[in-house]
Image: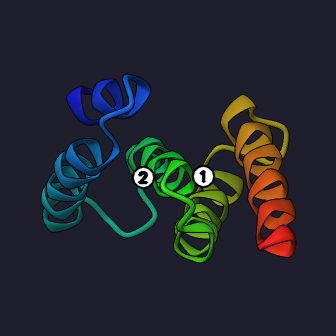
Amino acid sequence: DIGFFFIEHGHYEEGLSMLNKCLETQKRSLPDDHPSLVATYSHITLGLSKLHRYSEAFDIGMKALDIATKQLGDEHEQTCYLRAMLKLIADQMELH
């Protein structure tokens, strides 16, 4: 998705803006625990962490992890990725 592309290329604010618009659209048409939300929340988490907005990133990441665990399973690749990303964010929060 284009928001993630922007984040990957260092344009964090633009990427987050696009991802938040995408999330608004998804939330209007999907249930709150739909697996498609996991990727969007994950990308938002990444963008926020790149901007050193660790507390916000952690909160959004926890939403993604909750959905991933329930809908995809505890051992799914995305669930494991989120757990690792949240650990890194928590470590950064302790440093700042």
> Would you place residue 95 above or below residue 42 in this image?
below
Which quarter of the figure is the C terminus placed in? bottom right
Disc 2 from disc 1: Cα separation: 19 Å
Left or right: where 20 falls relative to 45:
left
Q: Tell me which residue sits at (39%, 44%) in the image.
A: 36
Residue wearing tag 1 = 71
Mark 1 secondary-structure assignment:
helix
Residue 13 place in picture, x, y as percent? 27, 51
Which quarter of the figure is the N terminus placed in? top left
Q: Tell me which residue sits at (84%, 38%) in the image.
A: 75
Q: Tell me which residue sits at (70%, 47%) in the image.
A: 82
Label number found at residue 81:
none
Going by the numbered disc 1, the residue's amino acid type is Gln
Left or right: where 28 falls relative to 48:
left
Way the structure is coloured: rainbow
> Would you place residue 94 above or below residue 73 in this image?
below
Residue 33 place in picture, x, y as percent? 46, 64
Left or right: where 50 falls relative to 29:
right
Residue 30 place in picture, x, y as percent? 25, 59
- Is the C-beta separation of discs 2 and 1 under 8 Å? no
Residue 24 place in picture, x, y as percent? 17, 64
Q: Tell me which residue sits at (23%, 58%) in the image.
A: 20
| Lower position in the chain sequence, tag 2 or tag 1 | 2
